[in-house]
Image: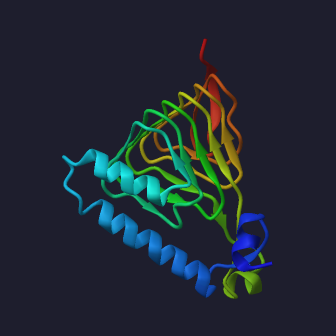
Amino acid sequence: MTEKQKMLAGQLYNAGEPGLLKDREHASAQIFEIFNIHPSQKEERQKKFRQLFGSAGNAFTIEKGFHCDYGYNIHIGENFFANVNFTVLDCAEVRIGNNVLIGPNVGIYTAGHPLDTEQRISGLEFAYPVTIGDNVWIGGSVAILPNVTIGENAVIGAGSVVTKNIPANVVAVGNPCRVIKEIK
């Protein structure tokens, strides 16, 4: 298997492999181009984001300060909004549903590092997917860790660290993030 195939399969892989480095440089260059387009040219920005992402709905807004590793593992739905400084380490697939609101300074992290010191020092890492359902609101400065699913209609309170799955129709907050009430 190639390092990219290992990455996408959730196995340990070498993130410094030349092909993956080239993919990250390509994504970085595309992001640079996107944010050098005047903000009034929204359609042109969206076109460039569609070229970067694996898939994207027709209507979406991503404010400045966006960063991702690869782009091609990101899939966003309709009526998506991401506020400033949105970071997606998309070494694995990130699927975001329709009508999702992302507050400022939110990070979605699919990448992780082994606990074994020798493996970590050698540059190995792993990646697990993140899925966010329809109609989710994620408050500012939230960190979403690898292998997490957030159910539809959920609200994640500002400053939360989401380490485990969050069911649909709930408000969840804290570090670690936990359900505090159901939404009727």
Comparing 174 with 27, the one in front is 27
Coloured how?
A: rainbow
Comparing 180 with 119, the one in front is 119
- The structure residue drawn at horizontal position 30% and vertical position 54%, both measured from the top left corner, is 64
* Quarter holding residue 116: bottom right
- The structure residue drawn at horizontal position 71% and vertical position 40%, both measured from the top left corner, is 165
Percent across and percent down for residue 55 are 54, 49
- The structure residue drawn at horizontal position 55% and vertical position 81%, both measured from the top left corner, is 21
Percent across and percent down for residue 28 are 41, 71
> Which quadrant: the C terminus?
top right
User: Going by the picture, which residue comes out furthest to the top?
Assistant: 184
- The structure residue drawn at horizontal position 52% and vertical position 81%, both measured from the top left corner, is 22
> Which quadrant: the N terminus?
bottom right
* Quarter holding residue 152: top right
Taking the image as shown, residue 164 lies to the left or right of residue 58, namely: right
Taking the image as shown, residue 85 lies to the left or right of residue 136, namely: left
Comparing 6 with 42, the one in front is 42
Percent across and percent down for residue 86 are 42, 53
Taking the image as shown, residue 11 lies to the left or right of residue 106, namely: right
Q: Is residue 145 above or below residue 178?
A: below
Q: Is residue 158 above or below residue 37?
A: above
Comparing 180 with 51, the one in front is 51
Percent across and percent down for residue 177 are 62, 40
